[in-house]
Image (cartoon, helix red, strand yellow):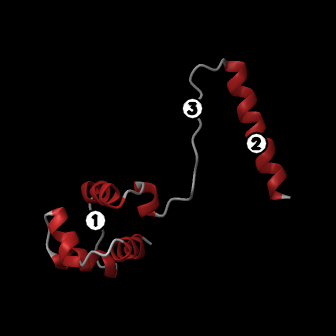
Amino acid sequence: MIAERIKFLRERNAYTQTELAKKLGITRSSVNAWEMGISVPSTQYIVELSTIFSVSTDYLLGVEKTSTIDLNGLSETDIEMVYTLAEYLKTKNRR
C-alpha cells in the first residue's frame, strides 16, 4: 500500500525518483526500493514524505479514514451525548 502511495504522490507532483531522493537526502535506489515494495521508509522518512506531499502519515500508511472532533470546552455530559450520537449514526448507516 505505501509503495503505491509514494509512487502515486511522486508522479502527481512531477518528481523523478532522483529529485525526491535529493529532497530526502537519500539515494534514488532507496526511493525505487520503496516504490517496488522491497523496503519501507523509516518513520523519519514517512514524516518527511507527508510534509513534502502535504498528506497525512495515516494516508501514506493506508490507515482508514478517520476524523477527530475537538471536545475541549464541553462538559462530560456533552461529550457523552456526542459519543452516543456518533454510535447511533454508525449503527443507522450500517443498515
Q: Position of residue 60 (x, y in %)?
A: 41, 63
Q: Which residue is mark 1?
A: 41
Task: Name the amino acid, label 3.
Answer: Asp
Q: Which secondary structure lies at badge 2?
A: helix
Q: Position of residue 65 (x, y in %)?
A: 57, 56
- Label at residue 70: 3
Q: Look at the picture and state if 35 lies above or below 74.
A: below
In the displayed structure, does residue 78 sit left or right of residue 49?
A: right
Q: Which secondary structure lies at badge 1?
A: loop
Can you tell which of label 3 and label 2 is closer to the viewer?
Answer: 3
Q: Look at the picture and state if 83 lies above or below 48.
A: above
Task: Name the amino acid, label 1.
Answer: Pro
Q: Quadrant of residue 25?
A: bottom left
Q: Which residue is mark 2?
A: 87
Q: Residues within 10 Å of mark 1 (few under 14, many from 20)?
A: some
In the displayed structure, does residue 45 sit left or right of residue 22?
A: right
| CA separation in Å, label 3 and label 2 | 17 Å
Q: Residue at x 31, y 59 (%)?
A: 46
Q: Quadrant of residue 8?
A: bottom left
Q: Which secondary structure lies at badge 3?
A: loop
